[in-house]
Amino acid sequence: MRTARHHRTTRVLVATAAAAAGVSLAACGGSADQPRAAAAPAAATTPAAGSVYVAVGASETAGYGAADPAREAWPTVLHQQSLPRARYVNLGIPGATAADALAKEVPAAVAAAPTVVTVWLNVNDLVRQVPPSAYEYTLGRLVHQLRRGGQTKVLVANTPPVERMPSYLACRPSPPAGAPPCQAPVQMPPPEVIKAAVRDYNAAIARVVRAEGAVLVDLHTAGQRAHKAGDDGELFGADGFHPSTLGHRAVADAFAATLRSTEGR
């Protein structure tokens, strides 16, 4: 059952995403050209036997916000620094929800017989009014299929601190210097409302990870630490919504650190 709080949160997130992208999420949710991964150095082009890395996700996974999406998307950076000998497949679709990815990305991912899969899917579900329970169910099916009976290591990112996005802060009182222009058609609710929605989603993600034997990549805590250090503003692109080139590197680093911590498991 959708609460009044959920509807208010949805409206602000929809407005934030639309203002950041300059178009509605519905418009970018269809087919879109995906950036091609940059060629790896010659010494790293031969993958280890049976080693395949597949990235499942939305516009961030496709490289949006980076200066050179084909070379600087965070999965490409992760591939180059942590899995250079694996065959690399980036299936990210701009605007994809978990349900979209389950239908359009997972079949190709499973067909590739991956040894490692990364999943970052949450904000688009938030802005499209997907209740946490429905999101959890869909994400659970998605991760279960990607796990292939335990043959695949699946790393799942949780939701970053959305209330720190410059595109949201631009529409709050006293926006920070350098924030993009506020284009939201509705009044912004306080950060507590956004935080509550993110907590609900992250709790759902944590349950799916535990139930399916996947691995959690805690982008939320990483984002909070960056904010405390005063570095979070540099992690967003010009739209104030997608990661900048530096932000993509930071996401890749978070996945890489988590991947290293699971070696031998």
Image: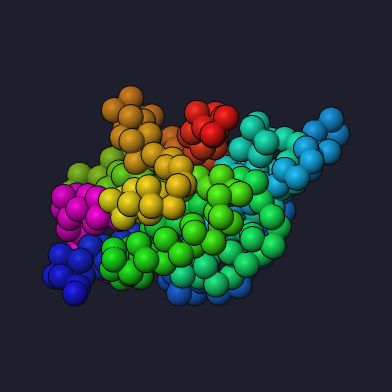
Q: Is residue 188 magenta?
A: yes
Q: Please tell me which residue is depicted at 65% across the width and 46% down the height of the picture.
A: 115
Q: Please tell me which residue is depicted at 33% across the width and 29% down the height of the picture.
A: 225
Q: Please tell me which residue is depicted at 64% across the width and 61% down the height of the picture.
A: 110
Residue at the outermost front position? 149
Q: Which one is nearer the viewer's eye here, 231 or 252?
A: 252
Q: Is residue 135 visible?
A: yes
Which quarter shows the C terminus? top right
* Residue 85, position as x, y percentages in the image: 76, 36
Number of marks in the rendered image? 0
Q: Which residues are magenta?
A: 184-201
Structure colour scheme: rainbow
Q: Please tell me which residue is depicted at 65% across the width and 43% down the height of the picture.
A: 76
Q: Which one is nearer the viewer's eye here, 46 or 242?
A: 46
For residue 249, which quarter of the picture?
Answer: top right
The answer to whether 254 appears left or right of 14 in the picture is right
Q: Which one is nearer the viewer's eye here, 247 or 173?
A: 247
The answer to whether 53 appears left or right of 240 in the picture is right
Q: Is residue 246 visible?
A: no
Residue at the outermost top position? 229
Q: Is residue 149 magenta?
A: no
Q: Which one is nearer the viewer's eye here, 41 or 99?
A: 99
* Residue 240, position as x, y percentages in the image: 41, 49
Which quarter shows the N terminus? bottom left
* Residue 26, position as x, y percentages in the image: 45, 74
In the figure, 95 relative to 197: above or below?
A: below
In the figure, 151 relative to 217: above or below?
A: below
| Main secondary structure along the magenta-highlighted residues | helix
For residue 234, which quarter of the picture?
Answer: top left
* Residue 262, position as x, y percentages in the image: 52, 32
